[in-house]
Image (cartoon, rainbow, N blue to C red):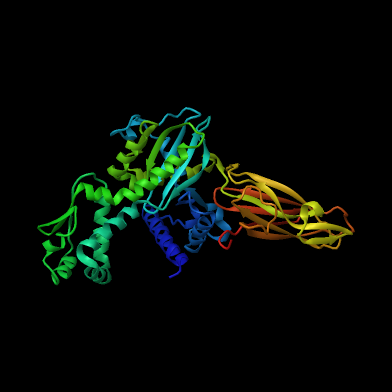
Amino acid sequence: MKALKVFSDSLRFLKDDALNTINSKAAGMKFNASDFTWVLTVPAIWDVSAKQFMREAATQAGIVTEETQDKLVIALEPEAASVWCKKLPSDGFISENHSKNSLDQRPGIQYILVDCGGGTIDITVHKILKGGALKELNKPSGNYLGGQNVDRKFKQFLREIFCEEVWEEYERKYPRELQKIMYDFTILKQVDEDVQISCPFNLAMLAQKNNEMENYFDSVQGASWKEGAINISRDKLRSFFYESLQGITECLRDVFKKDLSIEYILLVGGYAESKILRQHINDQFSEQCGILCPFRPQEAILRGAVEFGRNPKIVKSRKSGFTYGLAVLKRFDESKHMGKEKYRADGKEWCKNVFKKLVEEGEDLGWDETREHVLDAVDPDQTEMSVRFFRTERKDPGYVDDWGVDEVGSLKVKLCDPKRSRERKVKVEIKFGSTEITATGTDLNTGEKNTIKLDFMTS
């Protein structure tokens, strides 16, 4: 199946379920998707193309249409959680082993928000501004070593216990039963002690065809068999977390190397329910800053997303993940443009494909900031101007055909008759937001406009 179908069908189910629930309580009123603003959360470390993919999935799910796109807000999960944590009183946080019990709200306070999800670990650095708004101080970072990495280690351990042949057959024949084991484990991994998990009937049946159950445990350390259950020692349980915790620690240490004044680490997300994870972060970083985790840390993202949907301006600025620019013409200079293609127009020589930088990677961008540039038509016979947009992770590329520079969209603007005006200009405006970037080209003589959303799914 195509990923877009899987995601859109999942979102359609959630949308329909929400509307059915609301309408069942609405005393005869009938609400449609267009009556609401919807908030869809995504990891901050996802590429812009992945966020665009989610908007497309939401559109195919019927959450919004092409005409009602403003009814869908894409919220970055760490930002949503950050907004909620700012609202919590001191008794809203788990206090065990934490050196500070509430988040200081004074302007200037800096903290790291670690969203510990199933798939991703998402790390964002925020500074509280006057009035309570937030400023992003560092590009989102993280990795894909979330809670599912721990689950995979547990599943691999079961495979080692029951041998490859038995486990392969079990996975193939009883996927639903396996899903139940993994669900039970998500509850068990919240504790920091010896755990016991019931062995499913069909797994035991397949295993006992070849051997006695006790014999499977003779060659493994950290697990034993007792009365239909698998006992896993605390040390073995902790070993499943090792790779994930090391990955989180390395990412956080990279943040602490920067010129910042971090006073707190906030842990949120379902994986933050784990005592092992919380204790590890406390052991590694409690001497540098306070460690806070709200009760029900998964809900922090959900509740914060609602707050963010009501007021997206609460995050005043973010760091640009890329350098963005346009393809422009420059008067040809042999000393600068040697080896580059010449373009002749109006009796003059021009260099094509020069990268005109509008935003630099790592630069602060306001939540709804617009950058402008005016382009001149150099050919008197031009009837339209093609405007091409590019992005790169490089700070200062010279040309749009340099390595690492990708085209992310283009638009055409019709130009006025040259008899009307010898000086024909197009103003380009690029509107930056947390997810999509919109570009508009306007003929300054006629006022005619063309607008596109830059397409990052094909870059």
Q: Is residue 131 above or below residue 198?
A: above
Query: Residue 219 falls in which quadrant of the image?
Result: bottom left
Residue 189 x %, y %: 26, 49
Assign the C terminus to one quadrant of the image: bottom right
Residue 97 x %, y %: 29, 33
Residue 371 left/right relative to 215 = right
Residue 309 seen from this side: no
Query: Residue 197 falls in which quadrant of the image?
Result: bottom left
Residue found at the far top of this picture: 106
Residue 233 x %, y %: 19, 49
Task: Identify the residue shown where x is 27% and y is 50%.
Answer: 239
Residue 268 x %, y %: 37, 43
Residue found at the far left of this picture: 227
Residue 72 left/right relative to 252 = right
Q: Is residue 277 above or below residue 33?
A: above
Q: Who is closer to the viewer here, 403 or 146?
A: 403
Assign the N terminus to one quadrant of the image: bottom left
Query: Residue 409 falls in which quadrant of the image?
Result: bottom right
* Count of picture labels: 0
Residue 230 seen from this side: yes
Residue 273 left/right relative to 403 = left
Task: Identify the residue shown where x is 64% and y is 59%.
Answer: 407
Residue 204 left/right relative to 240 = left
Q: Who is closer to the viewer here, 52 or 168?
A: 168
Q: Who is closer to the viewer here, 159 or 30?
A: 159
Q: Who is closer to the viewer here, 436 or 445?
A: 436
